[in-house]
Amino acid sequence: MLIKFLELIGRFTIRRCEDFGKVVLLYLDTFKQLRHKPRIRHILAQMSHLGVDSLLIVSLTLLFTGVVFTLQTAHELIRFGAQSTVGGLIAIAIWRELGPVLVGVVCAGRVGAAITAEISTMKVTEQIDALRVMAVSPVDYLIVPRMLACMVVVPILTVFGDMIGVFGGWVVATKYSGISSYTFIKSIQTFAVLKDLLGGLIKAMFFGNVIAVMGCYYGLNCPDGAEGVGKATTKTVVSAIIVIFILNALLTFIIYGK
């Protein structure tokens, strides 16, 4: 029984190390392809496809996050006479953490799954083999435009989500908690700084990179058949979300640590 358990752990560890190595090699190949002239038309098409279609879900997610977060904190701060800090607290929390992380998770579920489904379908139907036959690098043609598009789109979505989240907090603070609009806005000007927003955008750029590359990796390594497409899509979403949380912790120490 113990031997089987150890064998299971060993196989799991080997598979994860193998996946990690393949992802690193894919990153190296992708960065090599960046030396070539970027396919602007493909990048813009991916930005439109991946970014514009995600606006609604990002807006709803951050709007209600700002509403709920303000509901949970404003009452307690008012009770201790700290109502003048509500706006700044909401803005800092959303700009630093809630905005980029939630946008990253939402995009991992929507954008990452879409990228994997598209590329894995191309692999199953042998379109990627056709690219190789025509001497076209799948990495240059498929991965680079999606990676660059996500690295631009996710920060833009984060800025949009940050503003929507703060707006939701403002509505609750002024209409429900009795805090004046002036106090709320003055609090943001007093406590929040540009670094809070820029740090979140740096995180979002890294998250976009991870989402695109993980989606492409699992798409290129998709098992044959329709069932394989579904498994690859699931692996993309789960893996991207886990990496986003780990990366968020590391970047927080780097950007905001003492």
Image: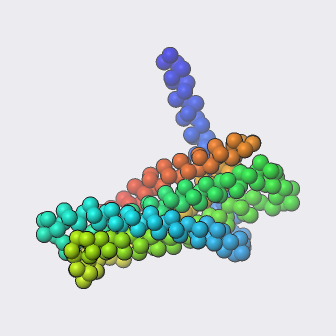
Residue 16, compared with residue 126, is above or below; it is: above
Q: Judge from the rendering whether residue 194 lies leftward or rightward of residue 126; answer left or right.
A: left
Using the image, determine if residue 44 lies above or below residue 119: below
Asked if one can make out residue 71 in the rendered structure from this viewpoint, the answer is: yes
Given residues 9 and 169, the one toward you in this image is 169
Residue 119 % position (x, y): 71, 55
Given residues 156 and 75, the one toward you in this image is: 75
| Residue in view at x 39 percent, y 64 percent | 64
Residue 85 at x, y percent in the picture = 22, 72
Determine the residue positioned at 26% across, 61% down: 72
Q: Residue 247: give x, y in percent of width and height.
A: 46, 55
Relative side of 123 to 113, left or right: right
Task: Answer yes or no: is residue 190 visible.
Answer: no
Name above or below for residue 17 compared with residue 11.
below
Nearer-the-camera pick, 142 or 120 = 120
Percent position of residue 84, x then y: 19, 75
Q: Residue furthest front?
A: 176
